[in-house]
Amino acid sequence: MKTRNKFKPGNILIHVILILYSIITLAPLITVFSSSFRTIGNQASHLKLFMEFSMESYRTAFKKMDFPIVFFNSFITTAGSLIVIVIIGAAAAYPIGRLKSKLSRFLYYFFIAGLVIPAQMVIIPVAQMFNSLNIPYTRFTPMFMFITCSMPFTTFLYSGFMKGVPVEIEEAAYMDGANLFTRFAQIVFPLLKPATVAVVITQGIWIWNDYFFPMVFITKSEQFSLPVAMIQFLGDRENPAQWNVLFASCFLCALPLITLFLIFQKQFVNGVAAGAVKG
């Protein structure tokens, strides 16, 4: 009986490509992580990995950033935006996925059209509108942009999943006397868990890491988000960049997301995998 050769030229090429891609992806992260453990004054080549192990850069970044305050600002902005995005996105996708009419099809393409419009193109008229409406620039102002920009993708994703929810389940609940809100909240929405997980992951990471909208709409330093607070370490002509402190602040910013992923890793992986199959 002949044994199958697992080391085919095609498989070897794929493995080589994956290894090279992993090296290219991980090399900058390892370099940054190594430099974050240096003292502030150590400006040796960053290619010399792990030549020093000091928490000075982390302590400086934690103090200068006011990490607890900016972390709270980022948490409030991200959590508040995600709650509204999930509720409105699922509610908007419900009639689009259920009704078979020209209006529902028009609304579906209307939301999808928002995917091709960059938010940066409309930032000036939006800022002028906020000024005319006397909307103050606080930590909550960027949430308007986060929610608006996330609606097209969220509605598109929920609409696709809505088609996979059997109508017969709702019909049985309707026969039992359940109203429209009850059918959606207690029957349909729980079945959309994979889509909800995918929305929370994709949009949550983007909102947490976004620098543009908080930079435009937040004027007070005590209301900065984590990405905006990190920029102060880039320096200027008079004050040189504190690269080691900046690298430490990068990992402080990413630490909450890494911790959250490690805790809910199984739920995240299952949700995304289910979304890939059902979507």
Image (cartoon, rainbow, N blue to C red):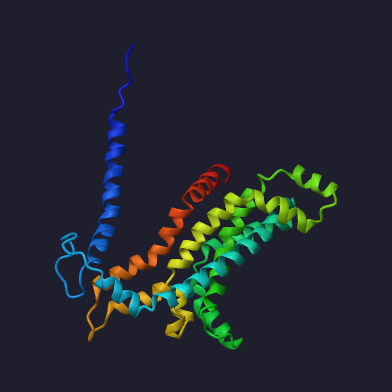
Q: In the rendered image, which quarter is residue 242 located in?
A: bottom left
Q: How many marks?
A: 0
User: 153 or 255: nearer the eye?
Assistant: 255
Q: Is residue 229 above or below residue 266?
A: below
Residue 82 position within the rendered picture, expressed as x and y whole percent measured from the top left:
56, 65
Residue 225 seen in the figure: no
Q: In the rendered image, which quarter is residue 107 located in?
A: bottom right
User: 237 or 222: nearer the eye?
Assistant: 222
Identify the residue at image location x=60%, y=65%. Answer: 83
Classify residue 181 as left or right of residue 82: right
Classify residue 58 as left or right of residue 108: left
Residue 156 position within the rendered picture, expressed as x and y whole percent measured from the top left:
60, 55
Quadrant location, the N terminus: top left
Identify the residue at image location x=43%, y=54%. Answer: 262
Residue furthest top as drawn = 1
Q: Is residue 160 above or below residue 80?
A: above
Residue 129 position within the rendered picture, expressed as x and y whole percent measured from the top left:
58, 83
Classify residue 11 as left or right of residue 265: left
Q: Is residue 80 above or below residue 201?
A: below
Identify the residue at image location x=29%, y=28%. Answer: 8
Residue 55 seen in the figure: yes
Residue 250 position within the rendered picture, expressed as x and y whole percent measured from the top left:
34, 67
Classify residue 9 as left or right of residue 255: left
